[in-house]
Image: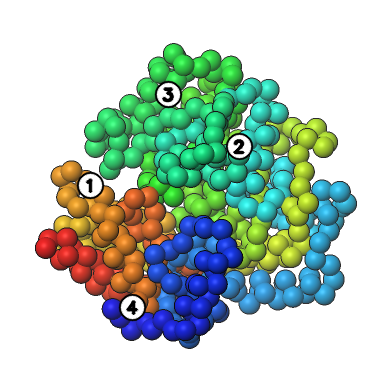
Amino acid sequence: MGKINIGRRTNSILSRDRKVMLTTTRAPYPFVPDHGEGDIVYDVEGNRFIDFSSFVSVYNLGVGGNAAIRRSMTGQIKKLTHNAFTDYYSERPVRFAEKLVSMMPRGFGRVFFSNSGTEANEAALKFSRVFTERQYVMSFYGAFHGRTGGVLGMTSSKPVQKEHFGPFPNVIHAIYPDTYRNPFNIDDADELSDACIEHIEKDILGKGYSQKEISAIFIEPMQGESGYVIPPKRFMKELSRVATENGILLVADEIQTGYMRTGKFLALDNFNVQADIYTLAKSLGGGTPIGATITRTSLGDIPAGSHANTFGGNLLAIAAAEASLDYVKRNMRSLQRNIKERGAYIMKRLGEMKDKYEIVGDCRGIGLFIGMELVKDRKTKEPAVEGLEDVLKECFYNGLIILPAGKSVVRIIPPLTVSQKSVESGMDILEEAVKKADAKSKN
């Protein structure tokens, strides 16, 4: 199929995995990474790949984290790795929290550390109920906020993620303004925004639930798992208004969209809107497990003992996260320039593909948060599920690591430090894969 050869070592690992591991989500190709640097990664066979996945938006500063992150972790290992931060005090997590707060909008000053994005959202869910003394929470169709009990109720991306795990009480779902796919069949961004807000105000708040019982509205500034959906700016401003007018907290899930992915530290800043609570994870730890829930100072504190964990604020994760954030702050302008230039180039190439190949239905993105939706037919917009798998496999066997989203979306999220050479080579590989899938779809 391409230049990548899969050998005995890879096949052995896959076979052993199937025997001892419970089934989980896997890419449709046999990738077993071994080491990497920047935007290049090698598998256990020694095959070389360009990384367009950031390992699910974790390696925003390069595969394996950069040298500064690794040095910081090595130094911490020699001192202490676990600090039981919710029982004992420790300076390093406090110092990192202070630095993290400095990146947030004015008025934010309370941080809770956990081990993942799911945990960060679980904390936000609990905190919002404590702060408001209300029981319900609103989320959106297409949302992905995690897979544990509380936040799984808010997740509404794929049925398999919730099957057998319910019921999920106290969760309300609203319509997310997807300009490419929406039940209103409205293409105009402002009209779609108004329709979605009217649905919330007249149907959900007007008929279904009292606003006095809704603690928070959880929203991804741009939906990730369900297909890299970019909402209109008007919608975010109107949603903020609805939340404020009804005393409902706005919680921004920035786990995949935040940490400079769009060129701004927080993706919500692209819409000139502020939330009351933000959640961060994935890229925050430079490759280590860490989540953070950041709240407005005016919301106050939570009762002692009402929420805690064992590994939140873990010193190894904090060491990596602090070095990563220090790098971001030192190199903010160059990162923003790289994100803008590389993102513009990718969108230009995708626009050209859309003009040439019928299988490309839509291209959308901000910064280096980019999606390309594949369809069987542009009029019906039927998802090209098989076409997506063909594209992903073709890319892999020609040296490009890339991931899916939604039913038939190619998600393009390279490290924010990606070079122009890698972007050009990666887009060449992607276009060849799209070209073949397009030809196959016509046979």
Question: To which residue does mark 4 refer?
Answer: 398
Q: For mark 4, does the 10 Å Cα neighbourhood hold few (<14), some (14 to 19), or many (20 or more) residues?
A: many
Q: N-terminal of the two: label 2 or label 3? A: 2
Please, which residue is most extreme toward the left here? 443
The residue tagged with tag 2: helix, strand or loop? helix
The residue tagged with tag 1: helix, strand or loop? strand
Question: To which residue does mark 2 refer?
Answer: 150
Q: Residue at left 59%, top 71%?
A: 65
Residue 288 image point, x, y percent: 65, 63
Find out whether the residues at labels 3 and 1 contact each other: C-beta distance under 8 Å.
no
- Which dot marks residue 429? none
- Which dot marks residue 382? 1
Q: Amino acid at mark 3?
A: Ile
Find out whether the residues at labels 2 and 1 contact each other: C-beta distance under 8 Å.
no
Alpha carbon distance from label 4 to label 2: 41 Å
Q: Amino acid at mark 4?
A: Asn
Quarter of the image for the N terminus: give it.
bottom left
Q: Residue at left 49%, top 66%?
A: 54
Residue 144 or 102: which is nearer the viewer?
A: 144
Find out whether the residues at labels 4 and 2 contact each other: C-beta distance under 8 Å.
no
Q: Residue at left 54%, top 34%?
A: 166
